[in-house]
Image: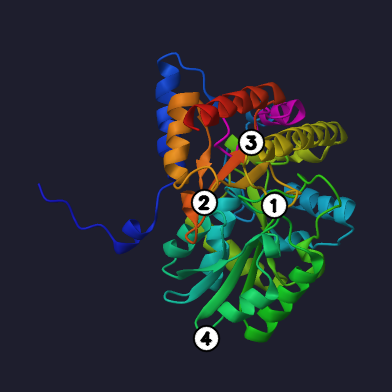
Amino acid sequence: MTLPTLSARSHRIQPFHVMALLARARELEAHGRDIVHMEIGEPDFPTAEPVRIAGEQALTQGHTGYLPAAGLPALRAAIAGHYRSRYGLAIDPGRILITPGASGALVVALAMLADPGRNVLLPDPGYPCNRNFVELVDAVPRAVRVDAGTDYQLTPGLAADACDDRTAAMLVGSPGNPTGTLASAADLQGLAALAQRRHIGLIVDEIYHGLHYGADPAQALEHAPDATVVNSFSKYFGMTGWRLGWMVVPRDWAPVAEKLMQNLFISASTPAQYAALACFDEKALEIFESRRAAFRQRRDFLLPALRSLGFHIPGDPAGAFYLYADVSSLCDDSFAFAEDLLEQAGVAVTPGLDFERTAPQRHLRFAYTTDTSRLAEALERIRGFLAAGS
């Protein structure tokens, strides 16, 4: 039997290379090996109890049918309240749409902004799915090299140099994945001004907002009020498996986004939306803040320890839960290094190949999504691995 030819798009979209390492790690665990997981960007904390209870109550009360595509009105209002209490911003709930994770929001944002054949500027390194989302709408991802000199953020100058008549949008993340760095207020203002001059879109992914370890990060809706801003309940709020996010769009775009969502998703999970209402309760926020403190302790433990072993990490990453390390002084191929580290030392990390095209062989991402005792175990194993190879 001859199967139909797959679309060119399906071949252009690349897999997560780390998933092969994760599959191998699970295989090793099945054979009795102890693996320290520092590869996947998923907090190790379970869903906070107030949120879990709210989800259970939603099921018990029969909240299992479709909701409006834009989301549960009470949740949209609660998110608006979150922007008011945390950032001092008055956001019309009508601009807020509830999506199946931040991924769903990013797909909708790109579908609104990027026609086939036009290009979207993406920082390199950056979150790998972003370029695949661009491919999904038959637009062209344009990688813009960022480095320690720009704190791994897309600056207005770099974006202006990369723009051309085919540019449809820019997509940035703050805090960023894989680097954990923050976009400054000045850069957000400059990107917003560039977007206005060039009549292009600005999408800001704030999925890691709340997970910061110094001064509060600049809020895109304050400094770039016409940007499309994406967020999620997965990271700070710890609801990864519930698959729930949101987006804030310019008021006139809300009906367009809702129309796309009606066709793409119908609506996000109903029990998850009712559960998420509890995220803004005082008790739940206390839990999230205690977890943020735990992530900071992990960062402050891991960062100097990795540097002492020869991993070069510029600056002090101020958000998310990642450290992006230059390993060129330790190896010539970070993917092979990650494979050997897993097989020989039982430590799973993510190679740069997933995040960048410019110099992937130079970098590894370490996720501090496991507790400090396990991080200490990982460091001892890495130290032994490096000593054995020297």
| Residue linked to disc 1 | 314
In whole angstroms, how far apart are the C-alphas of marks 2 and 4?
33 Å
Q: CB of mark 3 within 8 Å of CB of mark 4?
A: no
The residue stretch that appears in magenta:
37-55
Inspect the image, locate mark 4, and give the three-letter code of the amino acid beneath it.
Asp
Q: Residue furthest front?
A: 390
Q: CB of mark 1 within 8 Å of CB of mark 2?
A: no
In whole angstroms, how far apart are the C-alphas of marks 1 and 4?
35 Å
Q: Which mark is in front, 1 or 3?
A: 3
Tell me which numbered mark, 1 or 2, is placed earlier along the sequence: 1
Residue 334 as seen in the image, left or right of residue 280: left
Secondary element type, mark 1: loop
Q: Which mark is in front, 1 or 4?
A: 1
Residue 278 in the image: state x and y as whole percent.
Answer: 77, 36
Task: Give residue 362's mark.
Answer: 2
Mark 1 residue crowding within 10 angstroms, few (<14) / some (14–19) / many (20+): some
Tell me which numbered mark, 1 or 3, is placed earlier along the sequence: 3
Q: Residue furthest left?
A: 1
Residue at x-position 74% and y-position 76%: 190
Mark 3 residue crowding within 10 angstroms, few (<14) / some (14–19) / many (20+): some
Residue 164 in the image: state x and y as whole percent.
Answer: 53, 83
Q: Which mark is in front, 3 or 4?
A: 3
| Residue linked to disc 4 | 165
Q: Which mark is in front, 2 or 3?
A: 3
Inspect the image, locate mark 1, and give the three-letter code of the amino acid beneath it.
Pro
Q: Which mark is in front, 2 or 4?
A: 2
Residue 65 as seen in the image, left or right of residue 338: right
Residue 61 in the image: above or below residue 91: above
